[in-house]
Structures are given as structure tokens and as C-alpha cells.
Image: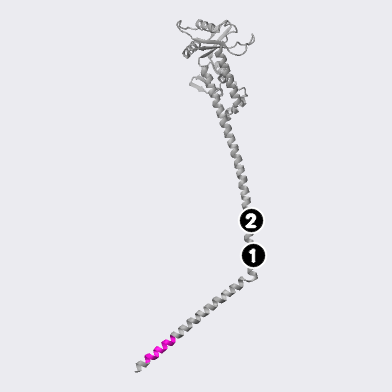
Amino acid sequence: FPSLRKEGRMGQKKGRTKKKESSQDKSAQVAQANTCLKQANVASSEAESPGTNMDSEGIIKAIDDLKTALKGDNAKLQQNIDHLGHEINGKLDNIATEVQGLAERVDERKTQLKVLDLESRSRRNNVRVFGVPEGKEGNSTTQYIETFLRSQLQLPEDLDLNIQRAHRTLATKPPPDSPPRAIIVNFLEFSTKEKILREVWKKGKIQVGSSTIHFDHDYAPEIVKKRREYNVIKKALKAKGIRFQTPFTNMRIHWESGTRTYSSAREAYNELKRRGIQSEEPVTADGGSRAEWSLRERLGWQPADSSGAAVALRAKNKLQDFQRSIAE
């Protein structure tokens, strides 16, 4: 029975221990709950205190001030953006205007070239005869030119010249002491015209009394002006006995080292200068100064009269001249 008493005492002891632990846990939970309640009361009282209300109002005011400042900055930024946009649009408009002007000038240049090409084609079968005294042709310029060509050139008797028309240029008749007007001769076939020019150039100088007669292609006025720019170059080359040719608007010079072709009188002049040959500076086709030509050549300027109205007027005059020449 002693063992039974011992176990009973141990069981009673364990029960009292468990009750004690349970009571301690409840006390800890109550203490924790009281602490949380106190903290909540303190937070509530602090939230309701005047100082906290003032801090909240200050924060709200600061936020409102920040919003106002941001609105002002946004307005200023928007104003700057609008100003920049207007400035960019203005520059783009200027660029568009300049591009349009360039396009118009390109179109005008193309129109000039087309008119020049059309006129050159209309003159393709023509020959200009220079030096025939005024009135020498009599009543029939066509008959006079045919007789003159057959008497001066070694032409086959069976060659039909097929001269369609021949007349003086449309300029007014010059005074007696002035150079005579050129005679324009139109051949039916281009090959006949080329044969006549070859025979003329083969013979060289043609002298009729005191007059020296020259033959050349019938170039358009713009081409004639361009070719005249080579006159001072030709003079310098002739003085040195250097052979040259002027096909269309170019110059071909036969140097001892070989033949070279130059596309402008300025280019040929620079070559003569480089080789130590003295020559006057060529003048511009539009009558500008030599310094102006040099500047225009470097900058790519065009003559001032290259406006659309000027081009149209020149085209109209050329067509009228051509119609009158056909009528005659």
C-alpha cells in the first residue's frame, strides 16, 4: 500500500502545478490586453490633441502649396513648349518656302533647257553665212546662195542642194558702214548641210572682193553668247599657233601633249594661265563683270533674269521669230 500512497501524492502535485500554470497564462493575457488598451487610449488622445490638428493642417497646406507650384511650373513649361513649337513651325515654314523656291528654279531651268533644245532642233539644218554685203543677194537670196556655193566649193554637179529657204536675219537693216546681217540658209537634209560645212572649212578662207565670207552652224542666241566667251581664248591660241576647235559650247585644244576639251571659257583660261600663255579674262555671257563671273562660278549662281516670266517671254519671242522665219 505504500506505493499507492506515493502515486496519489504525485498525482495531486501534478494537478496543482497545471492549475498554477493555467492561472499564470490568464494573468499574462490580461496584462497584455490592458497594455494594448492603454496604447489605444494614448493614440486616441494624441489624435484629438490640438498640436496634432495643427500638424495635419500644415501638411494639407504644404500639399496645396506644392500643387499650386506644380501647376505654375506646368503652365510655364507648357508656355515654353508652345513657344518652341511656334519657333520650330516658323523655321519649317521658311525651309518649305526655300525648298519650294529651289524647286521652282529647277523647273524654270528645265523649261529653259527644253526651250533651248527645241530651238536648237529647229535650227539643225541651218547654216549661217557671215560677211555677204547688204543687197548683194539681189531679189532672190536662195538663188544667190546656191550660185555662190557652187562657184566657191568643189561640189558634184549632180548634187541637189535642196535649199528650202534663205534670208537675212530678222534684225533691222544696219547703216552702210556697219557689218552686214548674216544670211540663214535652211537645207532640206542635214547631211547636205554637213557636207557644205566640211567643204567650206576644208577650203579655209573665202574671199569675195574685199569681203571675207564665214560659215557656221545656226546656233540659238544663248549658245552664241556662250561661244563668244571663248573669243579672248581663241585670240591667245592663234597668237601662239595652237590649233583649237569649238564644238557647240566646248573648246577642244590640241596641245603637244595631247588633246583636251574644256566645258567653259573660264576652265580654258585657267589652263592657259597654268601653261604660261597670256590671255585676257573671258567675260560672262550675260555681260557681268569678270569678278562676278568667278564668284557665280564658285557659288553656282544663276543669272538674275531667270524668273518664270522672263523665261516665258524669251520662249514666246523665240517661237514668234521661228514662225516669222517659216513664213518668209
Callout 1, which amino acid? Glu
Span colored in magenta: 6-17
Q: Nearer the viewer, residue 235 or 106?
A: 106
In the image, residue 10 lies in the stretch drawn in magenta? yes
Residue bearing the label numbered 2 = 69
Q: Nearer the viewer, residue 49 or 109?
A: 49
Picture residue at 59% right of the left edge, 23% below the top: 312
The image quadrant where one finds the N terminus is bottom left
- Residue 162 lies, in percent from the top left, at 48, 9
Question: Image quadrant of residue 315?
Answer: top right
Q: Nearer the viewer, residue 180 or 239?
A: 180
Residue bearing the label numbered 1 = 57
Residue 267 appears in view: no
The kind of secondary structure the magenta stretch mainly shows is: helix
Crowd band around label 1 with a 10 angstrom C-alpha radius: few (<14), some (14–19), many (20+): few
In the image, residue 39 lies in the stretch drawn in magenta? no
N-terminal label among 2 and 1: 1
Colour basis = one colour
Residue 27 appears in view: yes
Label 2 to label 1, Cα distance in Å?
18 Å
Q: Which of 42 and 200 is in front in this view?
A: 42
Picture residue at 58% right of the left edge, 36% below the top: 96
Question: Image quadrant of residue 182?
Answer: top right
Q: In this view, does 11 lie to the left or right of 246?
A: left
The image quadrant where one finds the C terminus is top right
Picture residue at 63% right of the left edge, 66% below the top: 55
- Residue 225 lies, in percent from the top left, at 58, 20
Callout 2, which amino acid? Ala
Crowd band around label 2 with a 10 angstrom C-alpha radius: few (<14), some (14–19), many (20+): few
- The answer to whether 187 is drawn above or below residue 284 in the figure is above
- The answer to whether 304 is drawn above or below residue 146 in the figure is below
Q: In this view, does 191 lie to the left or right of 5?
A: right
